[in-house]
Image (tube, coloured by chain):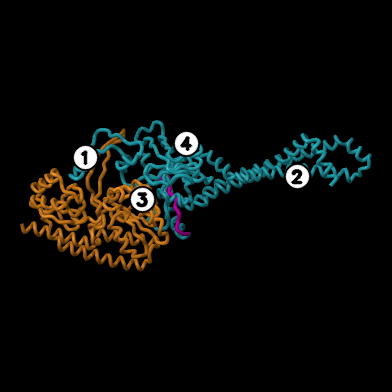
Chain colours: A cyan, B orange
Amino acid sequence: MNALYLAFAYLRYHWARSLVMVLVVGLILFVPLATQILLSTSERTLTARADATPLILGAKGSQLDLTMAALYFSEERPEPLPMAEAEAVWDSGLGTPIPVHTAFSSGGFRIVGTTLDYFDFRDLTISDGRGLAVLGEAVIGANVARALERGVGDALVSAPENLFDLDGVYPLEMPIVGVLAPTNTADDDAVFVDIKTAWVIQGIGHGHEDVVTASEVAAGLDVTANAAIVEYQRITPDNIDSFHFHGAENEFPATAVIVVPYDTRSGTILRGRYLDPEGRTQLVEPAGVVGGLVDRIFRIKTLLDVVTAVIAVAALAAVGLAVFLSYRLRAGEIATAVKIGARRGMVLRLLASETVTLLLLSGLIALAGAALVARNAEAWVGWLLALGT
Amino acid sequence: MARLLAVLATMLFAAGAAAAPDRPRVVAVNYALAYIAERLLGDAAEVVYPVPDGTDPSFWRPSIADISAIQSADLILLNGAGFATWTAKVSLPRSKLVDTSRGLADRLIATETVTHSHGDGGEHSHEGTASYTWLDPEIALRQAQAVANALKARGLEDEGRVDDRLALLAADLAALDAAADEALGALSTTVFVATHPRYQYLARAYGLTILSLEWEAGAAPTGDELAELRQLVAERGAEVLIWEAEPPEGARAAIAELGLQDAVFPPLAVEPPAADFVAAFAAGIEAIAAAASRAESG
């Protein structure tokens, strides 16, 4: 008890030196802990979304691009596939297809056109406002609301696909009717619209001034309007009746179709149906694709672990040297203690108490830091992953 | 008053959606499908026709509360064939939607074509589709089969009971078809005029010639509308006018003055007064046949 009291008194007297030692050792312990927590959370976050998405149907091409576009709404542009493919899954009676259309963006965030089934599938809840109801409306993720400082009652405008796209892809102003509760997934960074709204942005559907009257229709006339007609850029209760789509819905595009098989057997049958190497579509298991990607990424983690270990050993050696040198500097002080009657064991206990107290304080700081990281890891990892999309 | 009734109907519909969580709810976009669903489900589920009384379901615009109530249903029965255009402009869960005329593309009737251009895009065309598919009993049966398959797939009723009820409904529709064939089959030379373009499938099924006007249901025709009808009588030899709803008394007299016989055949998109689908269809057939007979006998 006396040794602990004396050790603490010594450390307090030399508070600046003690503080530096505590912080240095604390950092040496904290960095590998925090790195481990963030990496394992990243791995879990990446694979959790893929694990929760049984199958993705898309056009033949890069499986990684397809998976990243369907899961994380990345900027990859896999070849679109026609909605007939989603209907074919319905007709098979083997699973629920959920199309996603991610070709457009607004305010730097991806516009995700989908069906209401997506919200049930991802278990997304509305924190403010309501869900999608009418063509042209948008529901935004939590990060979109925060970053753009928009909420229910505001509006977003879709960005043209590219600056020189003059052929039909006009910006559409979309009222925000709901904000999603945060999920720390890519859904937080998405602007959700009905897939039909995405088709309107694409120019497949549009509304414009009337070109034909009811009586002309009744008379069965073929009416041709040769003059250019004014198109509406916002869907309102007054003009919604004029909105219509051209062509058959089966031919309209989707970036990918998330397929949720009804059971394991259905999933196996479905996978078998898309094995034809000559086919225009592919059915991928996102868990496998993301798992492969994560494996590659985490091979770097092994290297990082080695580097961390080497640095930790070097840092500990430096700390050990600092402690040893401080003992050498205190040689006179120790000799005085021995001369006034302190036994060698007492001196050793005193020095050990100082060291243990330093290590304990450093450990507590490292653990507190690690707890803080662990508590916010999902949010920070979500933010870090979103930076790349 | 009509607005108040519409609001009350919406509130009742929404309240109904919230009040009965145990019983599945099936929403149908027109009376014909609601009738089919009720026949196939019995008491196993609540069948909801969400359109307020007095509103044409083809042109109904649901409120946000209506849409919310429809989204929460267990099954949403669409007619397809362009009926109820509101369904293309609202967000509905695809997993609950059943397009009952899907797979009947070869049986649908194309209507008007409109061609236009705008912006820098080229010209394009809109081709319409006749929507009142159920007025051909054979198509109505195909739609009933689609409803039955959806009910069974979603487990809303026991498969055996659905099959039994479908067999009974099929028998009723077959009897209706036979009766219509007998009553209308020999009227291919009679020219009918309908107050609305609703009867394309009925006409095709029984070889009838039915021209169409655009009169408001249940309202007396205006002078211009009567002039248009007079022109059809003169140019096309129209003999019988088909009303889609009971007309005002004065309207019948005006039609008689043009030398036309008339009959009421409710197109059954909304529930007919005091009769169900089969009875109203049968009564409509009899009324048309009787009017044609009167026209023939002079």
Majority secondary structure of magenta residues: strand
Residue A20 in the image, given as x and y percentages of width and height: 75, 36
| Amino acid type shown at disc 1 | Val
- Distance of mark 2 from mark 3, alpha carbons? 64 Å
Where does label 3 land, which residue? B66
- Taking A267 as reference, is A169 above or below it? above
Q: Residues within 10 Å of mark 4 (few under 14, many from 20)?
A: some
Residue A321 visible at all? no
Query: In the displayed structure, does residue A341 sit left or right of residue A256?
Result: right
Q: Answer yes or no: are tags 4 and 2 on the same subunit.
A: yes
Tell me if label 1 and label 4 are in contact, CB under 8 Å: no
In the picture, the disc for residue B137 is none
Q: Amino acid at mark 2?
A: Leu
Gap between marks 4 and 3, in whole Å?
Answer: 34 Å
Chain ID of residue with mark 4: A
* Mark 3 burial class by Cα count in 10 Å: few <14, some 14-19, many 20+: some
Q: In the drawing, what numbered circle is on residue A223?
A: 1
Q: Residues within 10 Å of mark 2 (few under 14, many from 20)?
A: some
Residue A381 image point, x, y percent: 57, 43
> Which residue appears at 34% of the width and 56% of the height?
B27
Give the structural element (helix, strand or loop) at label 4: loop
Q: Which numbered disc, 4 or 3, marks the residue closer to the eye?
A: 3
What span is in magenta? Answer: A254-263
